Image (spheres, rainbow, N blue to C red):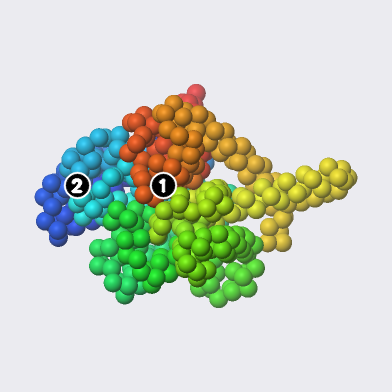
Amino acid sequence: MNYRMIFYLSGQILRVLGILMLLPIVTALIYNEPASRNAFAVTALVLIAAGTLITLKKPENKSMYNREGLATVAFAWLIVSVFGAIPFFLSGEIPNFADCIFEMTSGFTTTGSTILTDIEAMSKSCLMWRSFSHFLGGMGVLVFMLAILPHNDTRTMHIVRAESPGPTVGKLVSKMSFSVRILYGMYIALTVLETVFLLFGGMTFFEAINHAFATAGTGGFGVTNGSIADYDSVYIDVVITVFMMLFGVNFSLYYLLLMKKFTQVFKNEELRVFLCICLASMLIIAVNIMDIYGSFWQGLRYSSFQVFSTVSTTGFATADFTTWPILSQIILILLMFVGGCAGSTGGGLKVMRIMLLFKIAIKEIRCVLNPRAIVTVKCDGKAIDKDVVRGVSSYFVLFAFLMAFSILLLSLDGHDVGTTTTAVITCLNNVGPGIGEISPSGNFSIFSDWAKLLLSVDMLLGRLEIYPLLVLFTIRRNK
């Protein structure tokens, strides 16, 4: 294990994190918020100074392999979650540091769960930092750093593999560093486009950019207590629904569209399954709730928004879905597990894994019925590598075990079954709201400090897809 290289990259992360705090500092200056301005300024200066000192001496051995990539990514996310929370504490806006860590972890992991009971009482600069953390965490904290700083392509590959969501990671072009920049260019372009559309819907620039950041990262932090429901606008609902869908799709497909390879996009099996799941869920829920809203079309308006909000793991809300019939609630809970496509900013298990798990089950059934049959798991007409198949199965087992273990631990905090169970589900899948006391009209302030830290770990496990954190906690010095 190359500890010096991990330490060196951690210093770069501290420095970049400090520089990024310029955005909330500028926001505080615009809105005349001296307390939060000073909190962000002090934190930024300390982080930049510490990061500069750590990176003064470059390590002689700059090699990095898969193990170092996993450990670096895990350590980086712990750093940004803890140090990114300090301004909330220094400004006094969130006086409990466990709450600060929960809020910031929720921001960077793009979960969107919150402990805030009055969001509108927060300063504009703190609200901007919350939403901006979604934007940074959506594509990956280290992927952002790699997009703006020159790095060795081999090192980039190991880091991107460790941080990117989904069972496989590929290149768009021959160099991974160029691929990262292309992806980030598309990510920024979509975010700017959504901001413009929201401005046309009557939002202020502050509201539009915050909601665009939150949608891009599929996070869901809003700037009002009632989330998107407070705007009560069909136009805004439609715009955000469309962009939640776009950010839930594999970004590699957008590159194929730019290259005019339309056939490959339309033949993509994961995309077709993703859209079919969403369409079926929308229609079933719309019929199920049409009596509540007076017509099928009104039901479709609310069901489509909530379906894409849930399956993309954004977590915005235009209605409190816990008041909907049980069938609709169950469908939304199942969609929390499905999540977005591999290579998107969405959370959950990912559509690709769900597809492969289903195909693995079908393969096993066929092998039982005909032991001599040679059955391969295919996707897009191509055989899937056995290592990928084994990895998907192993990941699902680990995911299920960690979810069950977390639910058992959280049950000690003394909340009802719905609240306890969905709190873990929504945090592990990076969704946001749940059922019971943590519905869209509630929040996570009801949990004790240790429970919030447990849920913070769940959010990190879900966003990093388990393995980086496991590697970080099990590393041993090589002899």
Up the image or down, 423 lies above or below 110; here it is above
Residues under numbered marks 2 and 1 in contact, where contact means CB atoms less than 8 Å apart: no
- The image quarter containing residue 272 is bottom right
Q: Residues within 10 Å of mark 2 (few under 14, many from 20)?
A: many
Q: Amino acid at mark 2?
A: Phe
Q: Amino acid at mark 1?
A: Ser
Whether residue 153 appears in this view of the structure is: no
Q: Residues within 10 Å of mark 1 (few under 14, many from 20)?
A: many
Front position in the image: 477 or 76 = 76
Front position in the image: 413 or 470 = 413
At 51% across and 64% down in the image, what residue appears? 290
At 25% across and 35% down in the image, what residue appears? 96
Q: Judge from the rendering whether residue 166 lies leftward or rightward of residue 451; answer left or right.
A: right
Front position in the image: 198 or 170 = 198
Whether residue 398 appears in this view of the structure is: yes
Front position in the image: 4 or 186 = 186
Q: Which residue lies under the disc numbered 2?
A: 40
At 39% across and 38% down in the image, what residue appears? 456
Q: Judge from the rendering whether residue 65 lies leftward or rightward of residue 367; answer left or right.
A: left
- The image quarter containing residue 414 is top left
Percent of width and height locating residue 309: 46, 57
Question: Residue farthest to the top?
Answer: 479
Q: Which residue lies under the disc numbered 1?
A: 439
Element type at mark 2: helix
